[in-house]
């Protein structure tokens, strides 16, 4: 029997979108920015997929916006060493999800994480 926090289901969407059923099963969506503002884009996805906890939008190299279902949001500056942009976004998304879930913290509006090791698990 395993204890601790289960891994979230993370879906990385490309510009073409994704299978709606797959998105409906995700805890976290990582999506590229579109023509809408990031808050509007996140709000739309959180409304469309009620099972989502977190939407992450990479907005530049090492920079992303994360919006939680409960209204919490953060702009994160972070890079995972040795990871490309998608891997880095997944690493940061997993970290934020678990940190929020385990600590039940309110994230500051702007959060800077200068270095995030991709094998670090806040549940350990």
Image: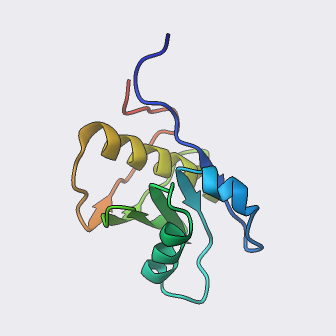
Would you say 45 lies left or right of 53 here? Answer: right
Please give the name of the residue rendered at 33% of the width and 42% of the height, measured from the top-left corner. 101
Q: Is residue 5 positioned above or below 74 on the image?
A: above
Q: Which of these two is toward me, 19 or 41? A: 19
Rendered location of residue 119, percent (x, y) = 51, 32
Dividing the image into 4 quarters, which one contains the C terminus? top left
Q: Quadrant of residue 110?
A: bottom left
For this orientation, the residue located farthest to the bottom is: 35
Residue 27 on image: x %, y %: 52, 50
* Location of residue 120 in the rendering, given as x and y in whole percent from the top left corner: 44, 33
Disc tally is 0
Q: Residue at x 59, y 51 (%)?
A: 26
Q: Residue at x 22, y 48 (%)?
A: 105
Q: Position of residue 122 (x, y in %)?
A: 37, 33
In the rendered image of this protein, does residue 110 appear above or below residue 53?
A: below
Residue 102 vertical position relative to residue 115 in the rendered view, above or below: above
- Please tell me which residue is depicted at 31% across the width and 67% down the height of the picture: 71
Among the 4 quarters of the image, the one containing residue 29: bottom right
Q: What colour scheme does the image use?
A: rainbow
Q: Looking at the rendering, which quadrant does residue 107 occupy?
A: bottom left
Instruction: Report whether 14 appears left or right of 31.
Output: right
């Amino acid at each position: 029997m395993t204890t601790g926090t289960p891994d979230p289901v993370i879906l990385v969407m490309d510009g073409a979108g994704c299978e709606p059923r797959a998105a409906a099963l995700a805890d976290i969506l990582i999506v590229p920015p579109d023509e809408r503002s990031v808050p509007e884009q996140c709000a739309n996805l959180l409304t469309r997929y009620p099972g989502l906890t977190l939407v992450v939008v990479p907005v530049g190299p090492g920079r992303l916006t994360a919006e939680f279902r409960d209204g919490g949001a953060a702009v994160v500056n972070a890079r995972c060493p040795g990871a490309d942009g998608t891997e880095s976004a997944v690493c940061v998304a997993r970290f934020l999800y678990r940190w929020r879930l385990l600590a039940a913290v309110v994230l500051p509006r702007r959060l800077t994480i200068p270095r995030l090791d991709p094998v670090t698990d806040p549940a350990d």
